Amino acid sequence: MSTFKRIALIIGVVAVATSPPAGALESEGDAAGIHFSVYAPDWTWQGRDANIMAVFENRSDAIATCAISLTMAEDHAGHFGRDGGPTTEETPPLVEEVSVAPGETRRIALTGLTALHGFPRQTYPLSLTLAVNDTETKIDYPLRTIRGQAVSDGLAVSLGLPIGVALLFSVAFAAVLFSTSAPGAWKTIPKPTPEPNQSEPWINQTPK
């Protein structure tokens, strides 16, 4: 295994070992000739946005109006904001709608759902509604919150920039070293260099 492959393998193992548990909501079904699929994360950082995508495939012969919306319990409404901040009276509801022609596939997304700081980490029993014309399908959507980022974005950039530059120069140095050195040169033992004051052995030899 080459050195680059070993480094990539080590980085991958560390990333998997230190990452949060992965998971997602994946649900699909049919309603009024429309096949729908929903994809959403089942956990989110506090202070970060969670995005939900719906895919509608029209298998009927008529245009369909498709929509996706999110609802939550009233006592949890204050735990979530939009686009990184709390909601106001002017904040629109999380609803997206699209018209899908026969044989067409359209994608829409609910974006900017922010789990706010200052609340206990928990699993929220949210609900998604998929509407196709007058037919509605309810999908339970449990969303778990985990602790927010340990450092701010500014600090992360100040730490990551020098690390990234150092890594870039290290990769460039390794690339130049491998491209300019002879194959297998690192396996060759160099000949010893005589000391400056040490004369060659043949000088002190007496001719026979």
Image (cartoon, rainbow, N blue to C red):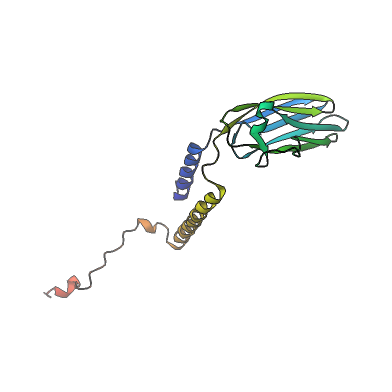
Q: Residue 128 falls in which quadrant of the image?
A: top right
Q: Where is residue 82 in the image (x, y as percent from the top left)?
A: 69, 39
Q: Is 127 on the left or on the right of 31, as rendered?
A: left
Q: Which of the 4 quarters of the picture holds residue 23?
A: top right
Residue 126 seen anywhere in this rendered image of the structure: no
Nearer to me, 188 or 150: 150
Q: Can residue 109 be seen in this view?
A: yes
Q: In this view, does 193 lie to the left or right of 55?
A: left
Q: Residue furthest right?
A: 62
Residue shown at the point (35%, 55%) measured from the top left:
187
The residue lying at 60 percent from left, 27 percent from top is: 123
Q: In this view, does 90 lie above or below 170?
A: above
- Image position, residue 168 (x, y; %): 50, 56
Task: Judge left or right: residue 37 versus residue 188.
Answer: right
The answer to whether residue 149 is left or right of residue 183 is right
Residue 70: image location, x then y, percent: 72, 30
